[in-house]
Amino acid sequence: MKPEIRRKWLRRSLFALAGGIVFLGVLIAFLPTILSGSFGRNMAVGFVSPLVRGQVSLASLSLSWSGPQVIQGFSIKGADGASITVDVTAQNGLIALARQSEPPHIVLSGIVATTYRPDGSLSLTELFVSPTPAVSQPAKATPAPSVSLAETLRGTILEITSLQLIAAGSQSDP
């Protein structure tokens, strides 16, 4: 290969590499903004939907590298009238949450609606899918480690500013 052709190829390769690095940097910088749109909302709804029995919706999602994470109008509505509608704000930025440099500070407000059944149970419990063991799969020699909700939330500051509980009697009550 001639030296001038090699230099042109090297120069073009370096420009392409620099352009790729700049594109990747811009993509990472705007990732919270991209995920705050309908793409991120649909991902969040798709993640939660298999875990509950009901219609899941999300009004708005606002993510930030250094500011608060805001979820507004997160709603689960069951067929029997039970529903949960909450607004959640994580006061920490995504960087602080990823680095775990400070405990997560979560502010929660919303409305929970349920009905009493004739047996005294609440219809709200039907919104959540209970984990069932897989019968068709053979048992593994070493079970996968499980993480409890208490372990996940350890150190989290949970501030409930407003939570309204509406519990009505069952349809068969006199």
Image: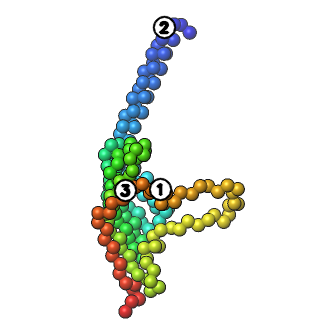
Mark closer to the chain start, 3 or 2: 2
Residue 124: horizontal and vertical position, in percent?
42, 73
Q: Is residue 3 above or below residue 21?
A: above
Q: Which residue is at the front of the view, 169 or 92?
A: 92
Q: Which mark is residue 157?
A: 3
The residue sitting at 44% across, 68% down in the picture is: 54
Q: Amino acid at mark 3?
A: Ile
User: In front: mark 1 or mark 2?
Assistant: 1
User: In front: mark 3 or mark 2?
Assistant: 3
Residue 17: horizontal and vertical position, in percent?
45, 24
Q: Are marks 1 and 2 in contact (CB under 8 Å)?
A: no
Residue 73: in sight, yes or no? no
Q: Which residue is at the front of the view, 110 or 49?
A: 110
Query: Which residue ends up furthest to the front in the rendered image?
Result: 155
Q: Quadrant location of the N terminus?
A: top right
Q: Residue 133 occupies which quadrant of the picture?
A: bottom right
The residue sitting at 37% across, 64% down in the picture is: 75
Residue 93: horizontal and vertical position, in percent?
35, 46
Q: Which residue is at the front of the view, 136 or 89?
A: 89
Q: Secondary structure at mark 3?
A: strand
- Distance from the alpha carbon under mark 1 to that under mark 2: 59 Å
The residue wearing badge 1 is 152
The residue wearing badge 2 is 4
- Distance from the alpha carbon under mark 3 to that under mark 2: 63 Å
